[in-house]
Image (cartoon, rainbow, N blue to C red):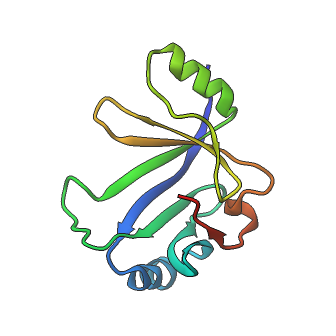
Amino acid sequence: MIKVKQVAHVCIFAHDLEKTRTFYEDVLGMGIQFNFLRDGKVFGFYLNCGGRSHVEVFQKDGTSYGDTNQINHFCLEVENLDAAIEHIRSKGVEITKKKYACDDTYQAWIRDPNNVKIELFEYTDKSAQFVGRDRVADW
């Protein structure tokens, strides 16, 4: 059986990363938990929503927003990712292998019947979502 604890994060794309950062920090008062780096440059960041919830933002040139494509995916924190993977497979749903990601968090991916991407997370004591520190992307 799978036990979802809460929504861990929602991922959005930004066509202007700095303007987006300024909006969330200055207008909504959300602090940066950590940045994602690629080739020595920031291309994304995590915003702290309080507790264990976050908004994940990535630079995506050419992004255009409309009623059908504003959110890239959402992520659910689960209690035990191995058990969740086993349960989901037993229901005949495809799921990726468990991966230890650059943010020191375990993850796996599924899609709902509408093709919505859903990331499943199991945090660790070293997860960047709690300890901070910029992370170099490994994808």
Task: Identify the residue at image location x=24%, y=72%.
Answer: 62
Picture coordinates of residue 77 (x, y %)?
60, 42
Q: Residue at x 70, y 48 (%)?
A: 123
Nearer-the-camera pick, 54 or 123: 123
Q: Which residue is found at the position 31% from the left and 29% from the top? A: 113
x and y, in percent, of residue 10 in the image:
46, 55
In the image, is residue 75 above or below residue 33?
above
Residue occupying the point 39% across, 42% down: 117
Nearer-the-camera pick, 113 or 94? 94
The answer to whether residue 2 is seen in the rendering is no
Relative height, residue 5 to residue 10 (above, below):
above
Of all residues, the one furthest to the right in this rendering is 125
Count of numbered circles on the image: 0
Q: In this image, 135 relative to 111: left or right?
A: right
81 left or right of 36 in image: right
Residue 28 x/y as whole percent: 47, 76
> Is any atom of residue 96 visible in this view?
yes
User: In the rendered view, does 71 fall on the left or right side of 50?
Assistant: left
Q: Quadrant of the N terminus?
A: top right
Residue 59 quadrant: bottom left
Question: Quadrant of the rendered structure where residue 82 is?
Answer: top right
128 is higher (above) or lower (below) than 90: below
In-image side of 26 versus 82 (left or right): left
Residue 75, horizontal then vertical, whole percent: 51, 47
